[in-house]
Amino acid sequence: MIVKDSAGRLVPVKSCASVDKRRKINLWFFDMLKAVLFDIDNTLILYDEARFLQSYFPLLAVRFKDIIPTDRFADKLMRATLIMHQNDGSVTNRERFLDAFCQGVDWSRDDIWSRFENFYLEDWDKLKDAVKVPDHARDVFEIIGRRGLKIVIATNPIFPLIAQMKKLEWAGLGDIGATLVTNIDNMSFCKPQLGFFQQICGIIGEKPKDCLMVGDDPANDMVAAKIGMKTYQTVDSLDHQDIPLEISRKVIGNDTDGIPPANFKGSLACVPQAVNILLQ
């Protein structure tokens, strides 16, 4: 929970003490916390994945109906997305995606990409009503910003920047001034590859041990612990998501074998308390 103190500043209160510290932590190790990384999907916005995709695929397919049969579009898109998730850092995610998506399509890559961009500019907001925002989302960023920490939006970089920024706007966070917002053009790895988190550290100039990764997914987000990041698993999405789609899990994976339990587990609203602990 977050309230205002006597000076009118937003602060976490003791009810956040329910944050579950899953592993014993040597607090001296954390005096160099420099950056907090946030996932977006089912962390900063909450939605039922199955229902969202049922609306997303047909809406996007209309943009390609003259070159790709509508009944084949979803499979083609997901196949290209799966290949993009296997990117090895040698090219941008957009290049890897277009290499796969444009196979068998007799149109230029520029034309194909412009169709995607126009969709996100003109139609993406039609999906806004499918999402909800967890309590105190904006307050969390205001508190962390006061601590002088870098804020990174470390969402899976499978969409262009315009789409990621619109998602932040849906959460009321479009103006937070993040150091980095990961997207299809500035990244060459995807979650849950460790290269994704290593690339972020390289871009922001911080060591993994000085970063906290905040997200809902026990695999795609908590895997950051494998390179030394501290982790906070949010629980706000539990009432907002259906059983994940099989095809989606093929893309993003869900293997938690070998991933250490999160250092912290709780609501998004309690992240500032975890930050305070790490800065002690």
Image (spheres, helix red, strand yellow):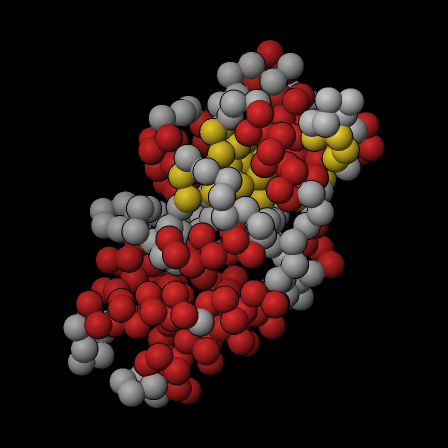
Relative image position of residue 83 (x, y in whole percent): 33, 61
Residue at image point 66% right, 30% down: 272
Quadrant assignment, res 45: bottom right
Q: Is residue 190 left or right of residue 253?
A: left
Q: Quadrant of the N terminus?
A: top right
Asked whether 70 or 11 is in front, the reply is: 11
Q: Quadrant of the C terminus?
A: top right
Relative height, residue 172 to residue 277 (above, below): below
Asked whether 37 or 176 is in front, the reply is: 176
Relative image position of residue 152 (x, y in whole percent): 46, 37
Q: Is residue 179 visible?
A: yes
Q: Residue furthest right?
A: 15
Q: Is residue 201 left or right of residue 214?
A: left
Asked whether 18 or 45 is in front, the reply is: 45
Relative image position of residue 181 (x, y in whole percent): 41, 44
Residue at image point 71% right, 47% down: 135
Relative height, residue 255 to residue 49 (above, below): above
Q: Is residue 79 visible?
A: no
